[in-house]
């Protein structure tokens, strides 16, 4: 008689594992992906133009590894491309100050400020970054492009453009 019920010893744990997996899959179909995999998929979705999916995947990666500055900056870039400049600024402001002052961090902050309508703050931020690293070509190009958009900043734009090409 006991041998007839022996299958329960295997069926019950297997059923629990299967139901746990099914529930996890239902709550988050990406639960099994690593943060690096999530970020790679987010960047691919962004390149395809699927901004909602890119944001979803990047937010999951950042939530799983909140101290990873590269993930936060990538999420900031995706937010900026999705038309959410305030979220970009909020993400970068939560970073370590040294990470926020990297070329990539300054670029994202400046572009977000510009999209929020505060070009002067963006130019001031870039000018501060260029004081620390005056030969950063990427910052020079961004600063020149932003300065060229305002008629009163054209001499500044010419200065930045000439510095970026030398």
Image (cartoon, rainbow, N blue to C red):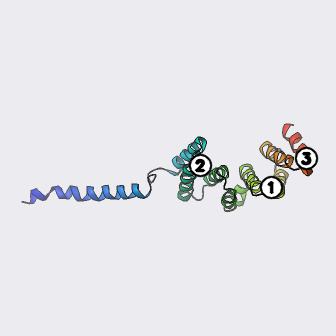
Q: What residue is at 84 percent from the left and 48 percent from the top?
A: 149
Q: Nearer the viewer, residue 134 or 78?
A: 78
Q: Could you tell me which quadrant the C terminus lies in? A: top right
Disc 2 crowd rating (10 Å Cα; few below 14, some 14-19, many 20+) is many
Which label sits on residue 65? none
Q: Tell me which label, 3 or 2, sits earlier in the chain.
A: 2
Residue sitting at the far top: 166
Disc 3 crowd rating (10 Å Cα; few below 14, some 14-19, many 20+) is some
Q: Tell me which label, 3 or 1, sits earlier in the chain.
A: 1
Q: Position of residue 160 (x, y in %)?
A: 87, 44
- What residue is shown with label 1? 122
Residue 158 sits in quarter? top right
Which mark lies nearer to you, 3 or 1? 3
Q: Position of residue 85 (x, y in %)?
A: 69, 56
- What residue is shown with label 2? 51
Q: CA distance from mark 3 to mark 1?
A: 15 Å
In the drawing, does residue 35 fall left or right of residue 108? left
Q: Nearer the viewer, residue 68 or 31?
A: 31
Helix, strand or loop at label 2? It is helix
Q: CA distance from mark 3 to mark 2?
A: 34 Å
Asked if the residue under mark 2 is in contact with the one under mark 1, i.e. CB atoms within 8 Å, the reply is: no
Number of numbered discs present? 3
- What residue is shown with label 3? 154
Residue sitting at the far left: 1
Helix, strand or loop at label 1? It is helix
Q: Position of residue 155 (x, y in %)?
A: 93, 46
Q: What residue is at 80 percent from the left and 42 percent from the top?
A: 137
Q: CA distance from mark 1 to mark 2?
A: 25 Å
Residue 28 sits in quarter? bottom left
- Vertical comparison of 137 with 64: above or below: above
Q: What residue is at 66 percent from the left and 62 percent from the top?
A: 94
């Amino acid at each position: 008689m006991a041998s007839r019920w022996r299958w329960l010893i295997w069926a019950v744990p297997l059923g629990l594992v299967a139901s746990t997996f099914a529930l996890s899959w239902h709550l988050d179909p990406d639960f099994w992906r690593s943060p690096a995999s999530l970020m790679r998929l987010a960047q691919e979705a962004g390149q395809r133009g699927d901004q909602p999916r890119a944001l979803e995947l990047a937010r999951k990666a950042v939530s799983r590894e909140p101290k990873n500055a590269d993930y936060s900056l990538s999420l900031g870039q995706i937010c900026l491309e999705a038309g959410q400049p305030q979220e970009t600024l909020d993400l970068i402001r939560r970073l370590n100050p040294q990470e926020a002052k990297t070329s990539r961090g300054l670029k994202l902050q400046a572009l977000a400020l510009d999209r929020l309508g505060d070009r002067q703050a963006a130019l001031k931020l870039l000018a501060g970054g260029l004081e620390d690293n005056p030969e950063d070509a990427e910052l020079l190009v961004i600063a020149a492009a932003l300065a060229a958009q305002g008629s009163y900043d054209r001499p500044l734009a010419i200065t930045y453009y000439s510095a970026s090409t030398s």
